[in-house]
Amino acid sequence: MRDLGEERAKAYGWQNTYVFTKAMGETMLDVMRGDIPVVIVRPSVIESISNEPLPGWIQGNRMLDPLILSYGKGQLPGFLLDPQAVIDVVPADMVVNTTLAAMAKHGKAAKPGLIIYHVSSVMANPLVLDDLFHYSHEHFTNSALLDTRGNRIKVGRMRYFGSAEDFSSYIQDIIRRELLDAAADPTPPILSKRLETRRRKKADHFFHLAKIYEPYMFYKAWFDNSNTESLMEEMSIEEERRFGFNLRKIEWEDYFLNVHIPGLRRHVLRK
């Protein structure tokens, strides 16, 4: 069923069943709404809270975070991506505030129709993947994670690969070197076999991650957020101060260095 779903999603131009089924849901709403007013709020990649109520708070390890944390642990020295591709990121509190503003505007109007609010940063304040991993490198260089022995984990610059073949060769080369190092070490055969199995699983994990993230690591679409910006312009100064969602004001370097990655360490890694 999973393979059939992915095949059908791609046949209709969607990268996976996740976005395909969301599009199906929106289509059904549009077809069946009749005279009922419908508002759809579409956020892009939701990451940790930027301001209120708790900067850096995030629940679970998802979206970009498995890549960021794997990189910080020294487990992801390179990845399949276009460093100049724009990654559309929005803090969670700005998604909530946009939803509240949309409810306030349309809740009493009760006019038949459909309006869509894109909560996305790509038009207002684009962030490229190269900058994301540059900020991650700066953070983990200045505040390294520790390994199981309490030693600082050193991270190098992220290496980028433009094709699955190049990335596969790179990973296989890493695994091959690790196996050669293990072979030179006087390790009991049974333990050596376990290490080899672990490294093979590690390679499979890399390839699995690359397959999942590939559509987003080379993404070219930009989402029009003009409706959302118009909604923001209708707010009073006090409303914008308390419930603002102006993505143009986000300083991505400060957000990732001082808010998001520390939040991951605090709430996901429990540090």
Image: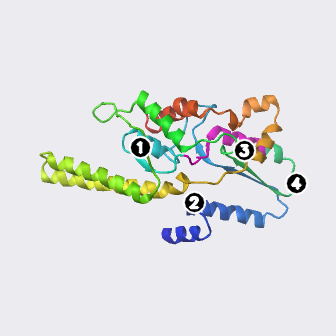
**Amino acid type, label 3:** Thr
Cα separation between marks 1 and 3: 32 Å
Amino acid type for the residue under numbered disc 2: Tyr
Residue extent of the magenta highlight: 84-102
Quote the CA–CA distance across marks 1 and 4.
48 Å
Q: Which residue is mark 2?
A: 18
Q: Sequence order check: which comes first, mark 4 or mark 3?
A: 3
Which of label 2 and label 3 is nearer to you? Answer: 2
State the CA–CA distance, disc 2 to disc 4: 31 Å
Question: Does the rendering let one see residue 212?
Answer: yes
From the top left corner, tell me how far across and down residue 206 is, in percent. 39, 53
Q: Is residue 271 visible?
A: no
- 1 or 3: mark nearer the eye: 1
Residue that badge 4 annotates = 111
Mark 1 or 4, which is nearer the eye?
A: 1
In the rendered image, which residue does mark 1 sit on? Answer: 70
Q: Residue at x 64, y 60 (%)?
A: 22
Find residue 41 and report its horizontal and vertical position in percent. 71, 50
Q: Which mark is residue 36?
A: none
> For this rendering, which residue is in front, 31 or 171?
171
Of 106 and 62, nearer the camera is 62
Q: Secondary structure at mark 2?
A: helix
Disc 3 marks which residue? 99
